[in-house]
Amino acid sequence: MNSTPRAVRSAAGARAAALLDHLWRASPPLTAVGALMLVVAAASVVGMLVDPRIITGAPAWLKPFKFAISTAIYSLTLAWIFGWLSDWPRVRRVVGWTTAIVFVLEVAIIDTQAWRGTTSHFNVSTTRDAVLFVVMGGAILLQTLVSVAVAGPLWRQRFTDRPLGWALRLGMTLTIVGALTGPLMTRPTAAQLADVRAGGRMTMAGAHSVGGLDGGRGVPVMGWSREHGDLRVPHFIGLHAIQALALIAVGLRRWRAPEAVRVRALLAATASYASLFLLLLWGALRGQSLVAPDAAALASIVIWAVVTMLVLAWIGVGSRRGSRDGLDRMAV
């Protein structure tokens, strides 16, 4: 009676092993970092359970946990993408090692600051804190710039699965754009500049929140502000465009529609995703909370949702109509 569950577990284990082997062959450093970050995430969970300290309104080890998970996802996704770029070994080697080193450095700094009981981002209260923040920011900027070296080959690579090809090209492009919203958070706020002009010393340079201070009421786990605009929201949406669009492309394989129709659906989903990213960025810069938007922000989201559904419905109806016409011609 237990043979079927055992067979399922065996098949799942074989697929996982095959995927891990594929990722390792595509990029050993990225695969190793992805696995390492899962271990770091688990350690961060333990830290949240045993360490009661709070930093800017959140458990001290919550940020290390979130960054470890995000880094693991990005590293393994990039290694998977490298599997499609077999003709670009130098790009895979340079980008893979650069990304791996940067991610280990970034998470190490974040964990070190959490262990010290202080913030990692925007912290310039001491020389050591300022140096760590600058090093971390410079490393991430370097990683973003080398990502362009991946986008170029993706635009030149030919894919037998055209929807997936477009998902990877457009997804990587949007991910780079999303990463470039990070520097918006490093600008000193008006309140920080006013303190300096009044003769004070700047201890924080930049903030996640727009229109208020960091550390107020936040969305569970993510910590996004429930009272003010938060640039982490569009930053997160932009950074994970590559995963979102790739999953959509893989899901479209189950749709028994012509490839041209699936390409149109993927392009429509990409346009919708990019529009959502821009709307969230616009709202954050206006100081609008994700959970309490004003009338203009709410109306824009409603319009976005309605237009997205209408376009996807139009594509679906067109696909069914084309299928019926094809059957009619075959019958004649």
Image (cartoon, grey):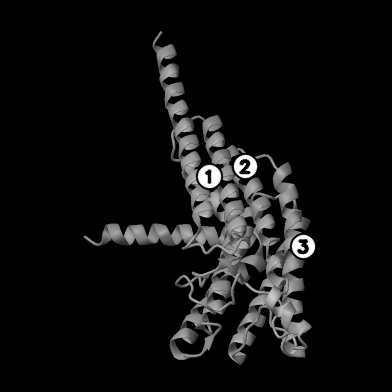
Can the viewer see residue 97?
Answer: no
Q: Does the residue at mark 1 contact the one at mark 2 (Cβ under 8 Å)?
A: yes
Label 1, label 2: how many angstroms apart (C-alpha)? 9 Å
Where residue 166 is drawn, which disc sits there?
A: 2
Label 1, on which residue? Answer: 249
**Residue type pointed to by label 3:** Val
Towards the viewer: 84 or 22: 84
**Residue type pointed to by label 1:** Ala
**Residue type pointed to by label 2:** Trp
How dense is the environment of label 1, judged by Cα within 10 Å: few (below 14), some, or many (20 and up)?
many
The earlier-in-sequence mark between 1 and 2 is 2
Towards the viewer: 26 or 34: 34
**Vertical comparison of 90 with 302: above or below:** below
Label 3, on which residue? Answer: 94
Residue at x 41%, y 17% (from the top left corner)? 327
Eye-nearest disc, 3 or 1: 1
Eye-nearest disc, 3 or 2: 2
**Vertical comparison of 128 with 66: above or below:** below
In the image, 322: left or right of 234? left
Towards the viewer: 141 or 19: 141
Q: Quadrant of the N terminus?
A: bottom left
**Vertical comparison of 142 with 202: above or below:** above
Q: Position of residue 34 (x, y in %)?
A: 59, 69
**Vertical comparison of 332 with 265: above or below:** above
Label 3, label 2: how many angstroms apart (C-alpha)? 24 Å
Towards the viewer: 219 or 100: 219
Can the viewer see residue 182?
Answer: yes
Q: Quadrant of residue 267?
A: top right
Secondary structure, mark 2, is helix
